[in-house]
Amino acid sequence: MGCNAILDRYIDQLLERSTPEAPAWNIEKIRAGKPNSWNYIDGCMIKALIELYDITGRADYLDFADAFIDNFVAEDGSIARYDPAEHNLDNVNAGKTLFRLHELTGKEKYRRAVDVVRGQLDGQPRTREGNFWHKAVYPNQVWLDGLYMAQPFYLQYELAYRDGRGCADSLHQFEVVRERMRNPQNGLYYHAYDESRRQFWADPVTGLSSNFWLRAEGWFAMALVDAWEILPASMSAERGVLGEMFRELVGAMLPYQDSETGMWHQVINLPGIAPNYLEESGSAIFANAIMKGARLGVLDKGLWDVGKRAFDGVCATCLSEEGGELALGNICLVAGLGNKQHRDGTFGYYMSEPVVTNDAKGVAPLVLAYIETMRGDELAKLDVEDPFGGFVR
Protein backbone atom coordinates (compact mmCIF):
# COMPACT_ATOMS: atom_id res chain seq x y z
CA MET A 1 0.00 0.00 0.00
CA GLY A 2 1.39 3.42 -0.98
CA CYS A 3 2.06 6.25 1.43
CA ASN A 4 -0.99 8.22 0.29
CA ALA A 5 -3.42 5.40 1.09
CA ILE A 6 -1.77 4.88 4.46
CA LEU A 7 -2.02 8.58 5.21
CA ASP A 8 -5.73 8.55 4.39
CA ARG A 9 -6.21 5.76 6.94
CA TYR A 10 -4.01 7.51 9.47
CA ILE A 11 -5.93 10.80 9.22
CA ASP A 12 -9.23 8.95 9.59
CA GLN A 13 -7.86 7.14 12.65
CA LEU A 14 -6.94 10.42 14.32
CA LEU A 15 -10.29 12.04 13.54
CA GLU A 16 -12.23 9.06 14.89
CA ARG A 17 -10.41 9.45 18.22
CA SER A 18 -10.63 13.22 18.52
CA THR A 19 -13.12 15.76 19.81
CA PRO A 20 -12.68 19.51 20.32
CA GLU A 21 -12.24 18.89 24.03
CA ALA A 22 -9.80 15.99 23.61
CA PRO A 23 -7.96 15.93 20.28
CA ALA A 24 -5.79 12.83 19.94
CA TRP A 25 -3.03 14.86 18.28
CA ASN A 26 -2.43 17.41 21.07
CA ILE A 27 0.13 15.46 23.07
CA GLU A 28 1.08 18.47 25.21
CA LYS A 29 -2.48 18.80 26.53
CA ILE A 30 -2.80 15.06 27.01
CA ARG A 31 0.43 14.87 29.01
CA ALA A 32 -0.44 17.92 31.08
CA GLY A 33 -3.91 16.56 31.87
CA LYS A 34 -5.39 19.97 31.14
CA PRO A 35 -8.65 20.81 29.36
CA ASN A 36 -8.23 21.86 25.78
CA SER A 37 -7.98 25.54 24.85
CA TRP A 38 -7.60 27.76 21.78
CA ASN A 39 -4.06 26.89 20.71
CA TYR A 40 -1.69 26.79 17.76
CA ILE A 41 -1.34 23.01 17.72
CA ASP A 42 -5.02 22.45 16.99
CA GLY A 43 -4.90 25.41 14.63
CA CYS A 44 -2.21 23.67 12.56
CA MET A 45 -4.28 20.50 12.33
CA ILE A 46 -7.61 22.14 11.54
CA LYS A 47 -6.04 24.33 8.86
CA ALA A 48 -4.56 21.22 7.26
CA LEU A 49 -7.97 19.50 7.31
CA ILE A 50 -9.61 22.50 5.64
CA GLU A 51 -6.99 22.42 2.88
CA LEU A 52 -7.49 18.67 2.58
CA TYR A 53 -11.21 19.30 2.08
CA ASP A 54 -10.42 21.92 -0.55
CA ILE A 55 -8.48 19.44 -2.68
CA THR A 56 -10.41 16.21 -2.02
CA GLY A 57 -13.95 17.52 -1.60
CA ARG A 58 -14.51 15.12 1.30
CA ALA A 59 -17.27 16.72 3.34
CA ASP A 60 -16.28 14.89 6.51
CA TYR A 61 -13.04 16.87 6.68
CA LEU A 62 -14.92 20.17 6.50
CA ASP A 63 -17.59 18.95 8.92
CA PHE A 64 -14.95 18.00 11.47
CA ALA A 65 -13.07 21.30 11.08
CA ASP A 66 -16.26 23.34 11.35
CA ALA A 67 -17.49 21.47 14.43
CA PHE A 68 -14.09 21.78 16.09
CA ILE A 69 -13.78 25.56 15.67
CA ASP A 70 -17.51 26.13 16.23
CA ASN A 71 -17.06 24.58 19.67
CA PHE A 72 -14.80 27.47 20.71
CA VAL A 73 -16.45 30.43 18.95
CA ALA A 74 -19.57 32.04 20.39
CA GLU A 75 -22.11 33.94 18.32
CA ASP A 76 -20.58 37.28 19.30
CA GLY A 77 -17.19 36.10 18.05
CA SER A 78 -15.65 35.62 21.48
CA ILE A 79 -13.43 32.56 21.75
CA ALA A 80 -13.56 30.20 24.71
CA ARG A 81 -10.33 29.71 26.64
CA TYR A 82 -8.47 32.36 24.66
CA ASP A 83 -7.20 35.53 26.31
CA PRO A 84 -5.84 38.09 23.82
CA ALA A 85 -4.33 40.00 26.76
CA GLU A 86 -1.76 37.22 27.16
CA HIS A 87 -0.25 38.54 23.92
CA ASN A 88 0.90 35.09 22.89
CA LEU A 89 1.63 34.97 19.15
CA ASP A 90 1.10 31.20 19.15
CA ASN A 91 -2.61 31.78 19.79
CA VAL A 92 -2.95 33.84 16.60
CA ASN A 93 -2.23 30.79 14.45
CA ALA A 94 -5.62 29.15 14.99
CA GLY A 95 -7.20 32.35 13.70
CA LYS A 96 -6.09 31.39 10.19
CA THR A 97 -8.87 28.79 10.11
CA LEU A 98 -11.55 31.43 10.53
CA PHE A 99 -11.17 33.10 7.12
CA ARG A 100 -11.87 29.96 5.10
CA LEU A 101 -14.51 28.61 7.48
CA HIS A 102 -16.40 31.88 7.16
CA GLU A 103 -16.30 31.54 3.37
CA LEU A 104 -17.36 27.90 3.40
CA THR A 105 -20.06 27.98 6.09
CA GLY A 106 -21.32 31.56 5.98
CA LYS A 107 -21.27 31.72 9.79
CA GLU A 108 -20.91 35.35 10.72
CA LYS A 109 -19.51 34.46 14.12
CA TYR A 110 -16.32 33.36 12.39
CA ARG A 111 -15.99 36.80 10.82
CA ARG A 112 -16.45 38.37 14.26
CA ALA A 113 -13.88 36.01 15.74
CA VAL A 114 -11.33 37.09 13.13
CA ASP A 115 -11.63 40.61 14.57
CA VAL A 116 -11.11 39.26 18.08
CA VAL A 117 -7.85 37.58 17.10
CA ARG A 118 -6.72 40.60 15.09
CA GLY A 119 -7.39 42.76 18.14
CA GLN A 120 -4.60 40.98 19.99
CA LEU A 121 -2.05 42.35 17.53
CA ASP A 122 -3.12 45.95 18.17
CA GLY A 123 -1.71 45.72 21.67
CA GLN A 124 1.05 43.20 21.04
CA PRO A 125 4.27 44.50 22.64
CA ARG A 126 7.06 45.20 20.16
CA THR A 127 10.81 45.53 20.07
CA ARG A 128 12.27 48.95 19.41
CA GLU A 129 12.66 47.95 15.74
CA GLY A 130 8.96 47.14 15.50
CA ASN A 131 8.79 43.33 15.74
CA PHE A 132 6.12 41.65 17.84
CA TRP A 133 7.36 40.09 21.07
CA HIS A 134 6.81 36.35 20.87
CA LYS A 135 4.79 36.47 24.08
CA ALA A 136 4.24 39.03 26.83
CA VAL A 137 6.06 36.64 29.18
CA TYR A 138 9.05 36.68 26.80
CA PRO A 139 9.88 40.41 26.77
CA ASN A 140 11.97 41.84 23.93
CA GLN A 141 12.22 38.44 22.25
CA VAL A 142 11.61 37.52 18.61
CA TRP A 143 11.34 33.80 17.84
CA LEU A 144 11.26 32.36 14.32
CA ASP A 145 8.15 30.39 15.33
CA GLY A 146 6.23 33.61 15.82
CA LEU A 147 6.63 34.70 12.21
CA TYR A 148 4.60 31.68 11.11
CA MET A 149 2.09 31.97 13.92
CA ALA A 150 1.15 35.60 13.29
CA GLN A 151 2.36 37.15 10.04
CA PRO A 152 0.29 35.22 7.44
CA PHE A 153 -2.82 35.90 9.55
CA TYR A 154 -1.87 39.58 9.86
CA LEU A 155 -1.35 39.94 6.10
CA GLN A 156 -4.56 38.12 5.21
CA TYR A 157 -6.58 40.29 7.57
CA GLU A 158 -5.04 43.55 6.34
CA LEU A 159 -5.65 42.64 2.70
CA ALA A 160 -9.20 41.39 3.30
CA TYR A 161 -10.49 44.11 5.60
CA ARG A 162 -8.09 47.08 5.75
CA ASP A 163 -6.96 47.68 2.15
CA GLY A 164 -3.55 46.25 2.94
CA ARG A 165 -2.63 48.98 5.42
CA GLY A 166 -0.57 46.72 7.70
CA CYS A 167 1.31 44.89 4.94
CA ALA A 168 4.34 47.17 5.06
CA ASP A 169 4.56 46.62 8.82
CA SER A 170 4.48 42.85 8.35
CA LEU A 171 7.13 42.94 5.63
CA HIS A 172 9.33 45.11 7.84
CA GLN A 173 9.18 42.45 10.56
CA PHE A 174 10.39 39.80 8.10
CA GLU A 175 13.23 42.06 7.00
CA VAL A 176 14.36 42.75 10.58
CA VAL A 177 14.47 39.02 11.24
CA ARG A 178 16.68 38.53 8.21
CA GLU A 179 18.99 41.31 9.32
CA ARG A 180 19.24 40.23 12.96
CA MET A 181 18.82 36.45 12.99
CA ARG A 182 20.42 35.07 9.83
CA ASN A 183 23.94 33.65 9.99
CA PRO A 184 25.75 35.06 6.94
CA GLN A 185 28.21 32.14 6.81
CA ASN A 186 25.73 29.30 6.37
CA GLY A 187 22.50 31.18 5.61
CA LEU A 188 20.56 29.55 8.46
CA TYR A 189 18.53 31.45 11.05
CA TYR A 190 19.04 31.21 14.80
CA HIS A 191 16.01 30.14 16.81
CA ALA A 192 15.52 33.44 18.65
CA TYR A 193 16.80 36.93 19.35
CA ASP A 194 16.67 38.95 22.56
CA GLU A 195 16.86 42.65 21.80
CA SER A 196 17.77 43.43 25.43
CA ARG A 197 20.63 40.87 25.46
CA ARG A 198 19.64 40.04 29.06
CA GLN A 199 18.35 36.48 28.69
CA PHE A 200 20.69 33.78 29.94
CA TRP A 201 20.43 31.97 26.61
CA ALA A 202 21.30 35.04 24.52
CA ASP A 203 24.74 36.01 23.26
CA PRO A 204 25.60 39.21 25.19
CA VAL A 205 26.81 40.92 22.01
CA THR A 206 24.35 39.78 19.32
CA GLY A 207 21.37 38.78 21.47
CA LEU A 208 21.06 35.55 19.46
CA SER A 209 20.44 32.05 20.70
CA SER A 210 23.18 29.58 19.91
CA ASN A 211 21.74 26.94 17.57
CA PHE A 212 19.66 26.28 14.46
CA TRP A 213 16.58 24.30 15.48
CA LEU A 214 14.92 22.51 12.59
CA ARG A 215 11.25 23.14 13.36
CA ALA A 216 11.76 26.85 14.01
CA GLU A 217 13.63 27.10 10.70
CA GLY A 218 10.71 25.30 9.10
CA TRP A 219 8.06 27.54 10.62
CA PHE A 220 9.95 30.52 9.20
CA ALA A 221 10.14 28.90 5.75
CA MET A 222 6.37 28.28 5.82
CA ALA A 223 5.78 31.86 6.97
CA LEU A 224 7.68 33.13 3.95
CA VAL A 225 5.98 30.99 1.31
CA ASP A 226 2.51 31.37 2.86
CA ALA A 227 2.93 35.15 3.05
CA TRP A 228 4.13 35.23 -0.58
CA GLU A 229 1.00 33.32 -1.62
CA ILE A 230 -1.31 35.66 0.30
CA LEU A 231 0.10 38.83 -1.27
CA PRO A 232 -1.61 39.83 -4.54
CA ALA A 233 0.34 39.94 -7.80
CA SER A 234 0.06 43.73 -7.71
CA MET A 235 2.45 43.74 -4.74
CA SER A 236 5.29 42.39 -6.86
CA ALA A 237 8.03 44.29 -5.00
CA GLU A 238 6.90 42.88 -1.65
CA ARG A 239 6.63 39.41 -3.15
CA GLY A 240 10.12 39.88 -4.51
CA VAL A 241 11.56 40.50 -1.05
CA LEU A 242 9.84 37.47 0.48
CA GLY A 243 10.68 35.29 -2.50
CA GLU A 244 14.37 36.17 -2.27
CA MET A 245 14.42 35.37 1.45
CA PHE A 246 12.68 32.06 0.84
CA ARG A 247 15.00 30.98 -1.97
CA GLU A 248 17.98 31.98 0.13
CA LEU A 249 16.77 29.87 3.06
CA VAL A 250 15.97 26.81 0.97
CA GLY A 251 19.39 27.07 -0.63
CA ALA A 252 20.95 27.12 2.83
CA MET A 253 19.03 23.99 3.85
CA LEU A 254 19.93 21.83 0.85
CA PRO A 255 23.50 20.96 1.94
CA TYR A 256 22.14 19.51 5.17
CA GLN A 257 19.48 17.25 3.64
CA ASP A 258 20.16 13.64 4.59
CA SER A 259 21.31 11.71 1.53
CA GLU A 260 19.56 8.49 2.52
CA THR A 261 16.16 9.68 3.77
CA GLY A 262 15.81 13.23 2.40
CA MET A 263 15.06 14.44 5.95
CA TRP A 264 16.88 16.90 8.19
CA HIS A 265 18.27 16.67 11.72
CA GLN A 266 16.90 18.24 14.90
CA VAL A 267 19.90 20.60 15.06
CA ILE A 268 20.32 21.23 11.37
CA ASN A 269 24.03 21.79 10.91
CA LEU A 270 25.37 19.10 13.27
CA PRO A 271 24.12 15.86 11.68
CA GLY A 272 27.16 13.80 12.65
CA ILE A 273 27.08 14.53 16.38
CA ALA A 274 25.27 12.03 18.59
CA PRO A 275 22.54 11.94 19.73
CA ASN A 276 21.25 14.24 16.95
CA TYR A 277 18.39 12.60 15.08
CA LEU A 278 16.29 12.90 11.94
CA GLU A 279 13.28 14.87 13.13
CA GLU A 280 9.86 14.40 11.56
CA SER A 281 8.04 17.69 12.07
CA GLY A 282 10.71 20.00 10.67
CA SER A 283 11.39 17.62 7.79
CA ALA A 284 7.69 17.50 6.92
CA ILE A 285 7.47 21.29 7.14
CA PHE A 286 10.31 21.67 4.64
CA ALA A 287 8.80 18.98 2.40
CA ASN A 288 5.62 21.05 2.28
CA ALA A 289 7.33 24.44 1.94
CA ILE A 290 9.67 23.34 -0.86
CA MET A 291 6.98 21.57 -2.90
CA LYS A 292 4.64 24.52 -2.40
CA GLY A 293 7.34 27.00 -3.36
CA ALA A 294 8.06 25.05 -6.56
CA ARG A 295 4.35 24.79 -7.38
CA LEU A 296 3.83 28.53 -6.93
CA GLY A 297 6.91 29.34 -8.96
CA VAL A 298 8.83 30.95 -6.10
CA LEU A 299 11.39 28.15 -6.49
CA ASP A 300 12.60 26.45 -9.62
CA LYS A 301 10.10 23.71 -10.35
CA GLY A 302 12.90 21.15 -10.36
CA LEU A 303 13.16 21.61 -6.58
CA TRP A 304 9.73 20.02 -6.20
CA ASP A 305 11.51 16.67 -6.29
CA VAL A 306 13.66 17.75 -3.33
CA GLY A 307 10.54 18.34 -1.26
CA LYS A 308 8.95 15.13 -2.48
CA ARG A 309 12.06 13.18 -1.45
CA ALA A 310 11.70 14.60 2.06
CA PHE A 311 8.01 13.64 2.10
CA ASP A 312 8.78 10.09 0.99
CA GLY A 313 11.58 9.86 3.53
CA VAL A 314 9.32 10.96 6.38
CA CYS A 315 6.71 8.39 5.40
CA ALA A 316 9.28 5.58 5.13
CA THR A 317 11.17 6.52 8.29
CA CYS A 318 8.51 7.78 10.69
CA LEU A 319 5.15 6.27 9.74
CA SER A 320 4.63 2.79 11.14
CA GLU A 321 1.85 0.28 11.75
CA GLU A 322 1.51 -2.34 14.44
CA GLY A 323 -1.60 -4.41 15.00
CA GLY A 324 -3.62 -2.17 12.73
CA GLU A 325 -2.57 0.94 14.65
CA LEU A 326 -0.80 3.63 12.65
CA ALA A 327 1.66 5.98 14.32
CA LEU A 328 3.84 8.89 13.23
CA GLY A 329 7.05 9.09 15.25
CA ASN A 330 10.30 11.07 15.62
CA ILE A 331 8.40 14.25 16.54
CA CYS A 332 10.09 16.67 18.94
CA LEU A 333 7.33 17.53 21.41
CA VAL A 334 8.41 21.10 22.12
CA ALA A 335 11.48 23.33 22.29
CA GLY A 336 11.77 26.86 23.56
CA LEU A 337 14.08 29.28 25.29
CA GLY A 338 14.07 30.69 28.78
CA ASN A 339 11.24 30.40 31.29
CA LYS A 340 13.03 27.36 32.72
CA GLN A 341 16.77 27.25 33.32
CA HIS A 342 17.37 24.11 31.25
CA ARG A 343 15.97 25.82 28.12
CA ASP A 344 19.31 27.40 27.33
CA GLY A 345 19.44 26.85 23.56
CA THR A 346 22.45 24.53 23.67
CA PHE A 347 22.80 21.41 21.53
CA GLY A 348 22.26 19.32 24.65
CA TYR A 349 19.00 21.12 25.37
CA TYR A 350 17.53 20.35 21.93
CA MET A 351 18.50 16.70 22.43
CA SER A 352 16.80 16.59 25.84
CA GLU A 353 13.22 17.41 24.86
CA PRO A 354 10.83 14.44 24.54
CA VAL A 355 10.36 12.70 21.20
CA VAL A 356 6.74 11.60 20.74
CA THR A 357 4.27 10.10 18.28
CA ASN A 358 1.14 11.52 16.65
CA ASP A 359 1.58 15.15 17.72
CA ALA A 360 -0.05 17.62 15.34
CA LYS A 361 3.13 19.67 15.09
CA GLY A 362 4.34 16.74 13.01
CA VAL A 363 1.06 15.41 11.65
CA ALA A 364 -0.30 18.68 10.20
CA PRO A 365 2.81 19.53 8.15
CA LEU A 366 2.84 15.99 6.75
CA VAL A 367 -0.81 16.41 5.74
CA LEU A 368 0.08 19.71 4.04
CA ALA A 369 2.98 18.02 2.25
CA TYR A 370 0.60 15.24 1.21
CA ILE A 371 -1.69 17.88 -0.29
CA GLU A 372 1.26 19.28 -2.26
CA THR A 373 1.89 15.84 -3.77
CA MET A 374 -1.69 15.91 -5.00
CA ARG A 375 -1.15 19.36 -6.47
CA GLY A 376 2.02 18.36 -8.25
CA ASP A 377 0.39 18.39 -11.68
CA GLU A 378 0.09 22.17 -11.37
CA LEU A 379 3.84 22.37 -11.99
CA ALA A 380 3.18 21.82 -15.67
CA LYS A 381 1.51 25.23 -15.76
CA LEU A 382 4.82 26.96 -15.03
CA ASP A 383 6.05 27.92 -18.46
CA VAL A 384 9.00 30.09 -17.40
CA GLU A 385 11.85 28.79 -15.28
CA ASP A 386 14.39 31.04 -13.60
CA PRO A 387 17.50 29.31 -12.21
CA PHE A 388 16.84 28.56 -8.58
CA GLY A 389 13.40 29.89 -8.64
CA GLY A 390 12.18 33.10 -10.17
CA PHE A 391 8.48 33.68 -9.74
CA VAL A 392 7.87 35.30 -13.11
CA ARG A 393 5.36 33.40 -15.22
Image (cartoon, rainbow, N blue to C red):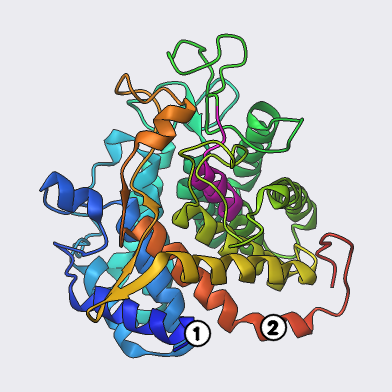
Q: Quadrant of the N terminus?
A: bottom left
Q: Which residue is mark 2?
A: 378
In the picture, the disc for residue 111 is none
Give neighbour class at mark 1: few <14, some 14-19, many 20+ (Cα, 10 Å).
Answer: few
Residue 324: percent from the left, percent from the top? 24, 81
Q: Number of numbered discs present?
A: 2
**Helix, strand or loop status at disc 2:** helix
- Judging depth in this view, the residue of 340 and 36 nearest the camera is 340
Instruction: Give the class, few, some or many, for how many residues have Cα within 10 Å of label 2's Cα (few <14, many ≥20).
Output: few
Residue that badge 1 annotates = 55
* Residue at (38% x, 64% y) in the render: 363
Please tell me which residue is depicted at 33% across the width and 89% down the height of the picture: 59
Name the element at disc 1: helix
In the depicted structure, whether residue 186 falls above or below residue 342: below
- The answer to whether residue 292 shows anywhere in this view is no
Left or right of 125 on screen, residue 390: right
Q: Which secondary structure dominates the residues rendered in magenta?
A: helix
Instruction: Give coordinates of residue 2: x percent, y percent.
Output: 48, 86
Q: CA distance from mark 1 to mark 2?
A: 13 Å
Residue 184, compared with residue 55, is above or below; it is: above
Instruction: Give the image location of residue 50, x and y in percent.
Output: 40, 75
Q: CB of mark 1 within 8 Å of CB of mark 2?
A: no
Q: Mark 1: which amino acid? A: Ile
From which residue to which does the magenta span run? 211-223
Residue type at mark 2 is Glu
Chain-order first, disc 1 or disc 2: 1
| Residue 221 included in the magenta stretch of the image | yes
Given residues 76 and 345, the one toward you in this image is 345
Rendered residue at 74%/51% (across/down): 238
In-image side of 263 versus 376 (left or right): left
On whether residue 111 falls in the magenta region, the answer is no
